[in-house]
Amino acid sequence: MIEGIGVFDILVVSTAMFFIGIYGFLVRKNLITILMSVELVLNAVNINFVVFNKYLYPDLLQGYMFSLFAIGIAAAEAAVAIAIILNVYRQMKGIDVEHVDTMKY
Amino acid sequence: MERILFYLIAAVIIVFSVLTVTSRRILRAAVYLLFVLMATAGFYFMLNYNFLGAVQLTVYSGGIVVLIVFAVLLTAHMDHKLDPPDRLKALAVGLLSLFGMGITLYALRSFPWAVTALPEGAYDIEAIGMRLLSYGDKGYVLPFEVISVLLLAAMVAAIIIAKKSTSND
Amino acid sequence: MPTELFSTTVWIPIALLLAFAVVGLFGHKMKPVVAGGISTAAILLAMVISYSTAYFYFFSDGLVEGKYVMLVPFLHEWLRFTDTLSIDMGILLDPISVMMMVVVTTVSSMVHIYSFGYMKGEKGFQRYFAFLSLFSFAMMGLVLAVNLFQMYIFWELVGVSSFLLIGFYYQKPAAVAASKKAFIVTRFADLGFLLGILLLSYFTRTFDFPTLMDPGGTAISSMAGLSFMGVSTLTWALVLIFMGGAGKSAMFPLHIWLPDAMEGPTPVSALIHAATMVVAGVYLVARLFGLYAMGAPGALEVVAFIGAFTSLFAAVIAVTQTDIKRILAFSTMSQIGYMMLALGVSGYGGEEGLGFTASMFHLFTHAMFKALLFLGAGAIIHAVHSNNMGDMGGLRKYLPVTHIMFLIAALAISGIPPFAGFFSKDEILAAAWANNQLYFWTEWFVAGLTAFYMFRLYFSVFWGANRTYEHQPHEAPASMLFALVFLGLASAVVGFIPFSAFVTADGVPFQTHMHLNIAIPSVAIGIVGIAIAAWMYMRPGTVADRLATAMPGLYKLSLKKFYIDELYLWVTHTIIFKGISAPIAWFDRHVVDGSMNGIAWVTAQVAEKTKKMQSGQLQHYGYAMVLGAVAFVLLLLYWGAR
């Protein structure tokens, strides 16, 4: 518990972070920056889990564990995503998301 | 005092988040992301979740951001500036994001948060280690094992995808 | 136990099937003589077993308390459906099946031996013998069948081997067409057979002959009182079964395949289309005779009428044909008509059952002399390389042995004593006389026609004009002559077998005696027929031609086989194909397919138009997703607020 700060205050921050991530995901063209936006989104969700755990169910630690696992999965996701990006870069000489459309219909 | 610190951290998170998604120099964007993640770790420390904050620092800020920086260095020149986004697109997406944020906040606002003052469970490193490796009630050994397999698979997959295929090149 | 004594009979089908498998699978790697030898050894083994079985059955073990019983020396449960209903594979011995064993194995052995000479140097010699073994196997399975379903299975197998052998010269379009025709026509008839079996077994709850034929059993009473369209169900079932038999036995109007089937090799015609397979229909009716006689006299009347009509009809056609094998084919139809008639006019027990005995007797003698006629015809064709009677004449000088044997067979079929046909035909006529004098006079007239057309053939081929042949006609090789002489002797003597002492409808032997009042007119008309034929054809002359021009309509009608084939063609082509199938095909092509194609076209068009929405741009998809999620949350909030 942070003195004088309620659930909602923290949720405002995480919500803002989430939608900034969404904005970046939809606007940015470079694949790496899109990956960064995804990390922002993921981080916002982690904060939510932690906050719910701390404020609403301090005796259970489920949210805590969940964010722990989410961080692990984020690491794996980032590794695979960067591998894919590097491969795309080699194949297409660029990592612009608008050029990655060879698999459409 | 804690309130001021909180507002400071919140301001850092929001400002650097915005900078991350708008900066036209990609390496800078990565550094801004690093700041956001570190500020998040600060949150965790403020909430007294020290182990989680440490994991956030090592895995996120230490691991993932370094990975991203490497990827940036491999795919772009240092002084390369990204093209500014299409204005119309940016406007549409921005409106959508703002609208989404608005209704989410509205929903959060109207929800009656039942903040409890229950005694906190043990969350020091020893207790978390015991939980991660125990089964039964409040044990997390199954997701722990699953995620270990997932990490192994991701590692193999990343190597296979990223390595230079001899046949193609 | 007498059944143990007969357990060797199981080796007959096994040996023949093995021969078929070995020759069929490995024949092309063998020398022709080896392949033929294997098949012939198998059928000779079957013949030996059949003869010993016949001896022990008729003279020691079959007769129990003055009655020939049904024995089942081998039974294997094959398909079990319910507690009470199963299809078994087995062997049933009773007077008619034992007699048929002897007939089939004898004729088949002779045909095997004959084929060594006739088919020599032919391409596909091994294939030919494999098919012969298959046919013999199927025929023995049919004859020995212990239940209706086993009989049906082998019945179809016989049809298949007949199809294969008719189409043996598969490069000849006529042979291919003939084999298809035979298969389709008999298959159509077998549909009736199957329906009859199902109808019968539905009510009686059994397929087994011993249960069906048990005089004290429930087979008939279980169907009593049921009727359909004013005719009892049992009659319907038996008429449908007879339809199958009529198809196999080439009874009018399902006879059209038999003349065309003569496209096959001549020994095959002798074996399948004269002596064995075509009498399967007679055998089928005889096999179920207890049911026919006691449960459905109406069905027997149908059998008798069809038999009598076919015998007359075919004899009239035979008078004008010029292809010697076709004459023999129509003659076969005519004689099978006799057998059917005899069954149709027969009663069940004692003297009443004379017709049944006569039918089986005629089947037996006919197998001998008709096989002989076909094999003789084969020898003639072998010598002259033509089927057409017009190409022959004066052959008695070149083919002395064939000539004598052919003469014996012709006398036998014409009913001249002491040859075999006289005795059996006499019994048939006696049975017809006792039942219906119209039938008697019909058959009496047919007997005269038979004598006429057989001697027309005989005189045209062996007497008549002396021709000069491109190749000097030569007598057939020894293997062919052996078969001819063997069957010739059989045709001469088998008439003296007192058949009624062995084969009767109810199994109880009785005494027959000569019917002088019938024998004299029948022999007389036979001699008249021969005399007319001699007058017309013995020396080169124009009597026949003048007669033909004097009655052009009748002659043409007979020559064209009463246009039955044309009628069939008209019915199938004009009515079925053009009248029924064509509109259905049009409907299918334009309405059914059209609607399906229309649906497919609309789907394809819609897909073509909408696939532009799939831009491949990740961010478009993401935008749509977020938009959707926000809209969903809005909806939830709206509903939550209410």
Image (spheres, coloured by chain):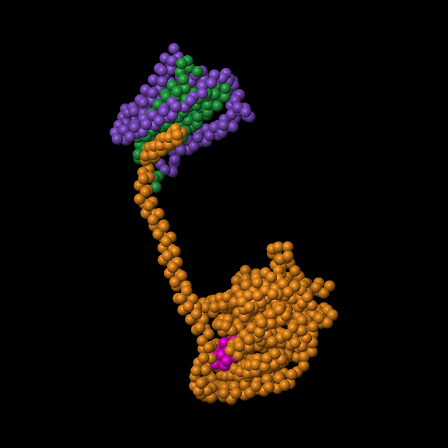
Chain colours: A green, B purple, C orange
Give how far across and how far down residue C483 sits, in percent: 59, 75
Q: Can residue C146 be seen?
A: no
Give how far across and how far down residue B67 sits, in percent: 38, 25
Picture quarter with the C terminus of chain A: top left
Q: Can residue B110 be seen?
A: yes
What secondary structure is the stretch in magenta mostly built from?
helix
Give the residue displayed 40% in from the left and 69% down from the top: C574
Give the residue displayed 46% in from the left and 87% down from the top: C547
Give how far across and how far down residue B68 sits, in percent: 36, 25
Q: What stretch is highlighted in magenta?
A: C315-329
Give how far across and how far down residue C155 sits, in percent: 56, 65
Is residue C100 located in the magenta-colored stretch of the structure?
Answer: no
Out of C51 and C320, give the one closest to the viewer.
C320
Give the residue displayed 44% in from the left and 15% down from the top: A1
Out of C337 and B112, give the one closest to the viewer.
B112
Out of C400 and C214, give the one closest to the viewer.
C214
Is residue C318 located in the magenta-colored stretch of the structure?
Answer: yes
Question: Which quadrant of the structure image shows residue C213?
Answer: bottom right
Question: Which quadrant of the structure image shows residue C365?
Answer: bottom right
Give the residue displayed 54% in from the left and 67% down from the top: C229
